[in-house]
Image (spheres, rainbow, N blue to C red):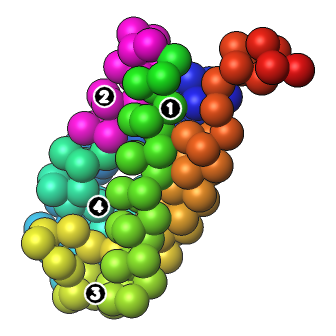
Amino acid sequence: MARLYAQFGAVVFLAVGLGGLLTGDAGTLVHHQPQGNVGPMALHLTYARDVIDLVIGGVLAFAGFRAQERIAGEIVLTIGVVLLLLALIGFANPDSAAATRSIVGVHFTLPMNILDAVSGALGVLCGLGGSATQATATG
């Protein structure tokens, strides 16, 4: 289960990271509006957040496609905990509509907090779930 989560998560986080690089940085204001948004959705993506997403996507790609089953489970569990911590920080310190609240260059908007919370919870569950080969061997 961890390997499948890692493969899917790699695609999602690499797409979010690359999409963020294409939309711009929330630190740049155009007509008094922060950049880094996708259409009407205020994401306030920054280059720091894009790098975080790309690193998470790369680590998950390694876990999903190259790592051994046990290592993949540990990586997924670790990434899940990191994402839950990001979500916790984001819900404790949400960003404003004008993108004036950031921590170390990362803006924590509601859509990104929800992505982090859901993917983090799934990562922890998949990381703790064990491998599919263990389940068939013991069952």
Kindly identify the residue that appears in the image at 48 percent across and 23 percent down: 70
Between marks 2 and 3, how big is the CA–CA gap? 31 Å
Is residue 67 positioned above or below 43 on the image? above
Dot 3 amino acid type: Ala
Q: Nearer the viewer, residue 15 or 80?
A: 80
Asked whether disc 3 touches disc 1, contact meaning CB atoms under 8 Å apart, the reply is no
Secondary element at tag 2? helix
Is residue 106 positioned above or below 47 on the image? below
Residue 11: image location, x then y, percent:
48, 28
Between discs 2 and 3, the one toward the N terminus: 2
Judge left or right: residue 134 versus residue 49. right
Between discs 4 and 1, the one toward the N terminus: 4
Between discs 1 and 2, the one toward the N terminus: 2
Judge left or right: residue 51 versus residue 87. left
Query: Residue beneath label 2, please?
Result: 58
Residue 132: image location, x then y, percent:
71, 20
Between discs 3 and 1, the one toward the N terminus: 1
Numbered circle sitting on residue 73: 1
Dot 2 amino acid type: Gly
Is residue 41 positioned above or below 132 on the image? below
Residue 128: image location, x then y, percent:
60, 44
Between discs 4 and 2, the one toward the N terminus: 4
65 in the magenta segment: yes
Q: Which of label 1 and label 2 is nearer to you?
A: 1
Please name the predominant secondary structure of the magenta segment in the image. helix
Q: Which of label 4 and label 1 is nearer to you?
A: 1
Dot 4 amino acid type: Leu
Q: What residue range appears in magenta?
A: 54-68
Query: Residue beneath label 4, please?
Result: 45
Q: Does residue 69 appear anywhere in the picture?
A: yes
Query: Residue beneath label 3, please?
Result: 98
